[in-house]
Amino acid sequence: FVEPFLHEKVYNHGHAAATIDPKKVIGEALHRRVGAIDHEMCDPGDEDTFYVADLGDVYRQHLRWKKNLPRIRPFYAVKCNPDPKVLKLLAELGTGFDCASKTEIEQVLSMGASPDRIIYAQPCKTNSYVRFVKSMGVKQMTFDNADELYKIAKLFPGAKLFLRIMTDDTSSLCRLSMKFGAAMDTTEGLLSLARDLGLNVVGVSFHVGSGASDPMAFWKAVRDAHIVFQQARERGFSMRTLDVGGGFTGDTFEDMAAVLDGALDEFFPTGCGVDVIAEPGRYYVSSAFTIACNVIARRTVEDPTLDGKGYMVYVNDGVYGNFSSIMFDHQNPVPKILRCGGETMYNKPGARPVPAGEGVEYSIWGPTCDGIDRIAESVRFDPVLDVGDWLYFEDMGAYTKCSATQFNGFSNSHDVIYVCSEPGARALIDL
Ligand code: PLP
């Protein structure tokens, strides 16, 4: 690649200094912020929900990527979390960016990234956006249907096109092939049309679905991509890039990577002249972000099925806000106690939910007037929560704040406190 894949500063300093305990760094930031609030006298909004983002976590995920998939250059999927400091760090680390809209492309270009570090990975594009990317020199883009080819032939015939193919995404949390991807029995026709229109098809892309759980989905998709490469060659195209999309999660990354790497060795061995890129989103940011919410109200529930008494607890964020991931991303965020009765509890045993039969039962609700605004149906804690206490939720970096609304007039723009548990990453960012 022309751009350095991993910034040389990382090679020089990245491994020298040891990781600082991430829990310690995050816990200190959470407690410092909450401890500074005068809950009796504060201004409206001073006790608003806030994030702590550990950029060291993002950095570690990058090193993990490099270790397991050294052949594949990641193009971070900006839609997942367009946090400016995350983008800056990834830009320094040499990744590319997968953008879906004009705003995302502008954000990446405004950091000084060159247009060839962007792939406009949206198979159904807005006309005016196609004109915009042409004017900006962003050439790489995906397509999956004939109408889009006619659009591109009219508006940006010099674009570098990736044919996005359909995948088996049945094992994923968010299925994308219901909406995008050319079926395998249409790819030959699309390639012939692209040739007849004089367009430049440079590669194949796919996405196995966000939050994928079956590694074989990658194997099948790479096999299908290989078939399309052959079809393209028969039509005079010389494809040079395979884009294996997103779908990676931190929990299963090594398993996914092993199968994907094996599939690449089988169908696109090193030296075959094909570069491989990917569009990971959630993998990079999910575990880096922790959110803290304030308990704003409590309702006592007298219910014999709750062995006596339970509570409905209302916090100042919910499914219309940063917990939009419950609706859109099929997540079940786990509440933990940050502060209870003035005592700080981050990462202490008492912070975690207790099993059935122990403690007190709670349901956790968001602040809007809608009944679907519920974060957790049932969770048990040992200490008794009351108004003014704080909860925290980990793994809140992916598809959360980017899809938060302002429903009921609640803000969707919350403070992010940045910390960095990796000394090696500090040289690359301003905290
Ligand atoms: N690429 C495309 C085209 C997508 O639509 C998405 C998510 O919707 C991604 C990449 C990122 O996927 P993930 O967060 O699962 O890695």
Image (spheres, helix red, strand yellow):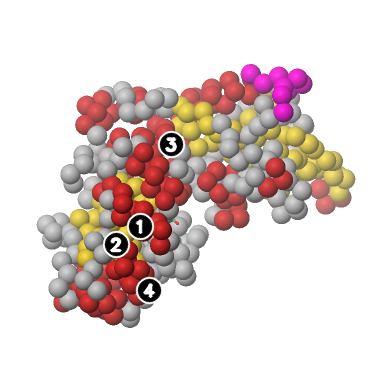
* Residue 131 marker: 1
Q: Quadrant of the C terminus?
A: top left
Observer-side mark, 4 or 1, equals 1
- Alpha carbon distance from label 1 to label 2: 7 Å
Observer-side mark, 3 or 4, equals 4
Report the residue marked by disc 3: 84
Report the residue marked by disc 4: 147
- Alpha carbon distance from label 3 to label 4: 34 Å
Q: Position of residue 13 (x, y in %)?
A: 26, 25
Using residue 62 as the reference point, say whether residue 230 is left or right of it: left
User: Tag 4: residue type?
Assistant: Asp
- Alpha carbon distance from label 4 to label 1: 16 Å
Q: Position of residue 168 (x, y in %)?
A: 40, 69
Q: 394 and 55: which one is in front?
A: 55
- Alpha carbon distance from label 1 to label 3: 25 Å
- Disc 1 vs disc 2: Cβ atoms closer than 8 Å? yes
| Location of residue 110 by image quarter | top left
Q: Residues within 10 Å of mark 3 (few under 14, many from 20)?
A: few
Secondary structure at badge 3 equals helix
Q: Position of residue 25 (x, y in %)?
A: 48, 25
